[in-house]
Image: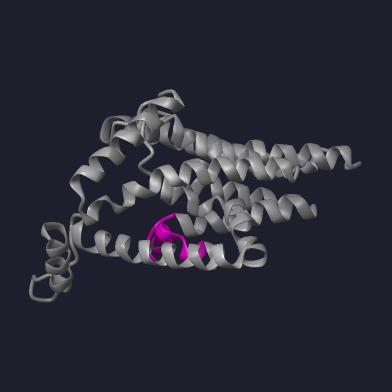
Amino acid sequence: MAMLAFPSAFILVSVYTESLFLAMVLSAFVLAHRGWYVSGALAAFFAGLTRSNGLALIPSLLIIGCMKWREGHRSPRPFAPALGGVTAYGLLAIYYNWRFGDPFAYLTAKRQVWGVHLTPPWTSLDVGITRVQHALAANDLQSIYVYLELPCVYLIIGSCALLILYRLWAEATFVAASSMMTFVSGTLWGLPRLTIFLFPIFVLLGKLHRNHRVLWYLFLLIAIFSQACLLLNYVNFRDPPPQGTRGQSPSGDCVRLASGWRTG
């Protein structure tokens, strides 16, 4: 419930990679913890082929491998899941070099097309604060997504702290490493979407259901309302808009309603 109600969770019903990546990451963790190392390696491999954030899975699975080693599994097999992730990125680099002449073609495209550069985390935070200030000044429906960025920062930091407190080292590493990939990109723009596949966050949010019922229902109400607004924004303000059979937008009433909110 916590995951499905999260404001940016509506993308899970669209053709995005978040759903597949979440499934592969969960599979890799579960299989590695249960000692099914070959299957875990396959899950990590496909997670690496799905999103660049699969890089954060490699150190997490290495930690699980070390834990299994200390428990007495004295063989290389506990490290197979981490090796699966490494293999995925090795093959991607070989393919990019063959196809584009650049083993880091993905990062090159991110830099040239989206302007993503390696920056200190505090630079991304400063940009995020500036984006919120501009959103407050704009005061329109399109700014709702920006309002989620800084709360997600606090949610991620709090989740990492609690995961460390619970001694869930592999999960804490996954959340921290995956988040850091965004924090050093120069912007917090993708953070609400990123939070969807940081599954330990939703395990922690789900505890509200048992321990703090009032906060749980408050979270659901705010999150579902925000998700509805984001979905309205996504359908009506992102290019290209959906077109009807006669070349007209099927959501014209929603556009006029949103325009009325902005001007009113």
Task: Tell me, yes or no, whether the highlighted magenta stretch contains residue 90.
Answer: no
Of residue 204 and residue 217, the one placed in the foreground of this image is 217
Q: Which residue is drawn at the image coordinates 67% and 48% (left, top)? A: 41
The residue most toward the right is 72
Provide residue 199's location: percent of width, then percent of height: 58, 54
Main SS of the magenta segment?
helix
Q: Which residue is drawn at the image coordinates 19% and 66% (left, top)? A: 242
Q: Horizontal placement of 218 versus 233: left or right?
A: right
For the N terminus, the quadrant is bottom right
The residue most toward the bottom is 245
Q: Horizontal placement of 240 versus 209: left or right?
A: left
Residue 111 shows in this picture: yes
Residue 223, quarter of picture: bottom left
Report the span colored magenta. Answer: 3-17
Instruction: Count the labels in the image.
Output: 0
Image color mode: one colour
For the C terminus, the quadrant is bottom left
Provide residue 6's location: percent of width, then percent of height: 46, 60
The residue most toward the front is 214
- Up-down relation of residue 119 to residue 78 (above or below): above
- Up-down relation of residue 75 to residue 119 (above or below): below
Q: Horizontal placement of 152 versus 210: left or right?
A: left
Provide residue 155's location: percent of width, then percent of height: 52, 46
Residue 253, quarter of picture: bottom left
Residue 94 shows in this picture: no
Task: Tell me, yes or no, whether the highlighted magenta stretch contains residue 16.
Answer: yes
Provide residue 236's location: percent of width, then percent of height: 20, 62
